[in-house]
Image: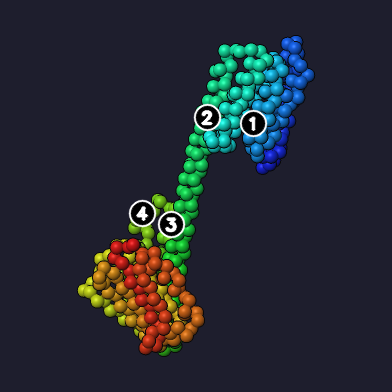
Amino acid sequence: MVAWLQRNPAWADALVGAVAAVVLVAITALGFRDQGVDPIAYPCCAVAGLAFAVRRRWPVVTFALVIAALTVFAATGQPGGPVYVTTFLAALNLAVLRPMRVWLPWTAVAAVALVGANWAANGFEAHLIPVALLLLATPKLAGDAVRARRLRVETLEARVGLAEQETLRRVAEERLRIAREVHDVVGHGLATITLRAGVADRLADRDPAEVRAALRAIRQVSKDSLAELGALLGVLRGDGEEAPGERAPTPDLRALPRLVDGLRDAGMDVALEVDVDEAPAVPEVVAAAGYRIVQEALTNVARHAGPDARARVRLARRDGVVEVEVRDDGRGAADPVRAGGGLTGMRERAAALGGRFEAGGAPTGGFRVWASLPVVPR
């Protein structure tokens, strides 16, 4: 019942008005019966109570009905009673729901009407002056307090909402990052294993030693990939008890020679060109992104460029940026799978650092992946 009333405020107000009318009439009839209550007092009490049935929808109407009922009640010389409390409640309701320019004139008129009606019926009574002033002050003080509390609640809710949105955004970004890492690790490992398995299959009858070497390489690639994958899964699990040495190191640009050598040993014709004496020292996040872009581009070469394709990797640092480029002379962008494979993840890595990314068919044939990553991420 309570939940239903919360969802239907109009019906809740109607119930409040009905209950208030019954209570006011009952208390007036039972408590003031011996003090000469006229019959007109009862409809006045009923109107003053029922006025609250529209208190939220029409607060001015509620206040006007209460004041009208109380003016008649006072002008006919009725004794005091709880019905006078409705004046302050209606004034408070009006002050909370309407600005000062609305409630102040209404309360001023009400104060004059009630004092005048009492004066006409009973003569001047000194206590009427503070009552009138109280009628003017109560809405101001109580209304300001209620509005201030409402503002604090709304501000707190807004802050909580922003904090929740920021948390959800960070969780989504972390999930996307881990998804890219898993894609790159698993994709590269499987591509290298496929190359090695193809070599072993071709040489199975002619060169058993080479087959054994290919199987050892497959084992090593599998072990490395599983180590990296285990580190990523540890992040997802929130493992904090592992020693640093048990986690696979974050790959960076200094690991590019090893990456190229592994693919070359697997049978790919790939070369690495570095425009500086050694891999540039850059922030870890930039180095990791550059490595993953090269890794994914070479994985696409292994998967889509064709068995006889040659690949060239170029690494350079100039004008505050690190450039990585992977070219091959294989099937190029003609392969629709190649055109979409892993490119989104590479583009997102570059964009996350404020860098640039290009991918597509090279002018001389084949496929080209190029990324420019600022040394200081933007």
Q: Which residue is mark 2?
A: 140
The answer to whether marks 4 and 2 mark residues whose Cβ atoms lie closer than 8 Å is no
In the rendered view, would you say 110 is above or below 252?
above
Looking at the image, tell me whether mark 1 or mark 2 is earlier in sequence order: 1
Left or right, 41 with respect to 291, comes to right
Q: Amino acid at mark 1?
A: Phe
Front-most of 152 and 225?
A: 152
Left or right, 232 with respect to 150, comes to left
Q: In 3D space, how far apart are the residues under numbered discs 3 and 4 (Cα atoms)?
A: 13 Å
Task: From the image, state whether disc 4 or disc 2 is nearer to you.
Answer: 2
Looking at the image, tell me whether mark 3 or mark 1 is earlier in sequence order: 1
Q: Position of residue 93 (x, y in %)?
A: 60, 32
* Callout 1 secondary element: helix
Front-most of 119 and 289?
A: 119
In the rendered image, the residue lying farthest to the right is 39
Dividing the picture into quarters, in which one does residue 197 lie?
bottom left
Q: Which residue is mark 3?
A: 235
Figure quadrant of the N terminus: top right
Q: Position of residue 213 (x, y in %)?
A: 38, 79
Colour mode of the rendering: rainbow
Q: In 3D space, how far apart are the residues under numbered discs 4 and 1 (Cα atoms)?
A: 72 Å
In the rendered view, would you say 168 is above or below 126?
below
* Callout 4 secondary element: loop
Q: Which residue is mark 4?
A: 243
Front-most of 92 and 345?
A: 92
Looking at the image, tell me whether mark 4 or mark 2 is earlier in sequence order: 2
Dividing the picture into quarters, in which one does residue 117 lie?
top right
Looking at the image, tell me whether mark 3 or mark 2 is earlier in sequence order: 2
Q: Amino acid at mark 4?
A: Ala
Q: In 3D space, how far apart are the residues under numbered discs 3 and 1 (Cα atoms)?
A: 62 Å
